[in-house]
Image (cartoon, rainbow, N blue to C red):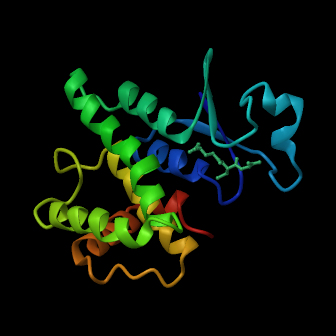
Amino acid sequence: MIKLYGGVFSRAAIVKWYLEEMQIPYGFVLVDLQANVNLQPDYLSIHPFGKVPAIVDGDLVLWESGAILIYLAQKYDKDLDTPEKQAIVNQWILFGNSTLGDGLLSAENSEKETPRLLGKLDSIFASQSYLVDNRLTAADIAVGAVLNYVLMIIKDFDYSPYPNVSAYIQRLRDRPAFKASMTLK
Ligand SMILES: N[C@@H](CCC(=O)N[C@@H](CS)C(=O)NCC(=O)O)C(=O)O
């Protein structure tokens, strides 16, 4: 069974959300970041930089939330049955973990990047409920997690100019797997 290593309120929640969505059996190993357990030799043998999340799946040890999502999607999403379909999902995962997160949260760039990024996402969600194939994929986990995370970091962040993005976030929040992984309680 997959072991997921994570901390309280950490990016491990993103991986947990996908595991729950896909109903993949897993065990959660809580790494106490406050007590620096992530910097102890036992954990550094799993993640050399002492970060969470990481997973162990048989002989595979893997870290970086985006790499883990890509791996899980490749292994468990049976509809991603061509390299091209997988590549499109990967593209969105990398977009979420880099371009989108950096753009919305960067002190220097967010003013310029926010309308550019959210404006385009808003027009995409005007005609579709999810990013790829109109069904939830790992792409939505990565992008949705960032959109949700922004609200946790910037409490008064205003999504109201982007009603389709707001509706998308709500659609994701209504999912039982989201509630089981991404909420603070
Ligand atoms: N890009 C990495 C970020 C990993 C990361 O920074 N994790 C934080 C928790 S959200 C962490 O481990 N912090 C503890 C530390 O840096 O000591 C990913 O998405 O997996």
Quadrant where the C terminus lies?
bottom right
Residue 177 x/y as whole percent: 44, 56
Q: Is residue 59 above or below residue 104?
A: above
Q: Nearer the viewer, residue 29 or 131?
A: 131
Residue 86 x/y as whole percent: 28, 29
* Residue in the picture at 40% in, 41% down: 94
Q: Which picture quadrant has residue 157?
A: bottom left
Q: Is residue 143 above or below residue 86?
A: below
* Residue in the picture at 22% in, 72% down: 164
Tell whether 121 sits left or right of 150: left
Name of the residue lying farthest toward the left: 127
* Residue in the picture at 46% in, 57% down: 101
Q: Which picture quadrant has residue 103?
A: bottom left
Q: How many marks?
A: 0
Quadrant where the N terminus lies?
top right
Tell whether 102 sits left or right of 59: left
Q: Is residue 173 above or below residue 85?
A: below
Tell whether 50 sits left or right of 185: right
Can residue 45 be seen here? The reply is yes
Can residue 177 be seen here? The reply is no
* Residue in the picture at 48% in, 51% down: 17
Q: Is residue 86 above or below residue 141?
A: above
Residue 112 x/y as whole percent: 36, 69
Residue 9 x/y as whole percent: 66, 60
